[in-house]
Amino acid sequence: MAKHWSEKYMAMNMNPITKQQTEHLRKTSAKFIFVHNKDGNATCSCCEKEINVGHTKHLQKYVCPKCGKEMQIQHEWRMKKNLRNINWMAVAKALDNHTLVIRYVMFSQYGNKPYAIAERARMYISDQYAHPEHYEYKDVYTNGKWETTWKYGRQSYFQFNVPMSCWIRNPYECWTANEFSATWFREINKLDVFKYYPAQQTYDKTRLVSQLHYMVRYGKMNEMCSKLGFNEFMEDNFNHYIHNHDTGISINPRKTSLKGILRLTNAQYKVFASHPRMRVYDMLRICGKDRVEDARYFISHGITAYTAKDIMGMSRKAGASVNKICDYVGSQNISSWELSHYWSILDKLDIDKADKNYRFPKNFRKTEEDINREYNLFLAKQEAEKNKEKDTKIRLISEGIKKNTELMGWLNGTNGLQIFVPECVADLATEGINLHNCLSTYVDRIIEGRTLIFFVRKTDDPEKSYVAFEYANGEVIQCRADHNKNVEDAKVINFVDAFAERLRQVA
């Protein structure tokens, strides 16, 4: 069995590129008039006639008096040593009623040396196969010697950028080839898929010739869509093909009805036909044949396919209907991702989310905040077990500060405020949770002696988090309240500054 479906076509004898095609490529590829000396003697690379251009400037535009083509002057004594002119022509050839080959012919010329024209690449396309296959005519090292032969793949000419590089343009890429227009549509329209719907009706001359892969693959589908007035769906699919690297929708080309080609059931097709757009088709395929009503619900509520996939997973996992999840998400003004994440936290805390009071709380934001606080404390406790050594070092620092009699006034409280010194990793984590900031990330810096963190509490409510500040290099680096807001209360600022001043004196 052949490894590649195109092998049997590669084995066919194919006529060489014609003289007409060769001449067309040569003339359209010509760019330069090569001036041999300062007397103006020159050769036109288009008509290959000897001419005299008189006095000219290097790189200026000049119209050949023999063939009338405007080209660029190249003074041979000034032109670049690596001057290169590469151009491609695409020749279409129908191989049977289902298969087409695009033959890529390369024109190459280096400096004022003789040009070469040769077929260097092929792209085989069939309406019977989902993907095209490519071959390149290149030097291959085989059995201890180099030989030029056809090789399956697209390592050299079918690369926009230089292989192993993502920013250097490949000067030898063939994708941007121009059509040999004399026989282009005559050959393409020999395929059955264009029998009643000629290729000219969808071919876009502003795009790469490889668009024929899309046209052949979806030719039958496009014909049916055109007759049914589903033109927007055709455009959606083409844009999807262009922007998603050749991964258009998966069709069944052997079916004779649009429903069969699109792999839809009767119920799915009924929904699709009422609004034939790509987002509707995607939703039907994601939901599957057994969840058509769910697809209908998602479509009518403008829910994206990505979100719908997430919601269906939640529905299966929790045993709740899609409608209930969507209604709840809408009523709480949250996203399905937020609800899914909330449920995952319930799992980690081993809370029975089958209880609707937890799964669908009346006030989601408040319950989520409570659960997150519980989860953060849970994590903090887990982390504390891992950080006993760090706790010991932080406790030594804390005890050293607390034993300093010069600081007792601030630690015991004055003027309604007092300083609290964290004694372990959990203290920092808990305060960070309560104040909605990142205090737990300062642990290593405290242990290494690079900074100190202090909490400010009110003496009439010493257990409640209020303000936290950082002290380093004899300065208060930052002083923040809840949600990292800068402290503006002069009483707190003066209290912190006075403590910092005494700390500098006793340090």
Image (cartoon, rainbow, N blue to C red):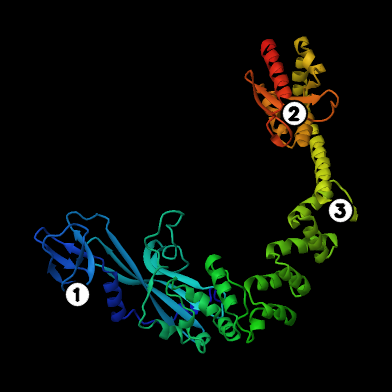
The residue at 82%/17% (across/down) is 412
* Residue 273 percent across, percent down from the top left: 67, 80
- Give the class, few, some or many, for how many residues have Cα within 10 Å of label 1's Cα (few <14, many ≥20): few
Residue sitting at x 89%, y 51%: 352
Determine which residue is flagged by label 1. 67
For marks 1 and 3, give the CA distance.
Answer: 83 Å
The image shows residue 98, relative to residue 208, as above or below, that is: below
The residue positioned farthest toward the bottom in the image shown: 196
Crowding near pointer 3: few (<14 within 10 Å), some, many (20+)? some
Answer whether residue 113 is visible to the viewer in this image.
no
Can residue 163 be spotted in the picture?
yes
Work out whether residue 252 or residue 155 is closer to the camera in this orientation and state it: 252
Q: Badges 1 and 3: C-beta atoms under 8 Å apart? A: no
In this view, 396 is above or below 252 = above
Counting from the top left corner in percent of width and height, residue 337 is at: 74, 55
Closer-to-camera residue (399/97): 399
Mark before the other along the chain sequence, 1 or 3: 1
Disc ID at residue 467: 2
Three-letter code for the amino acid on which mark 2 is drawn: Val
State the residue position of label 3.
Answer: 362
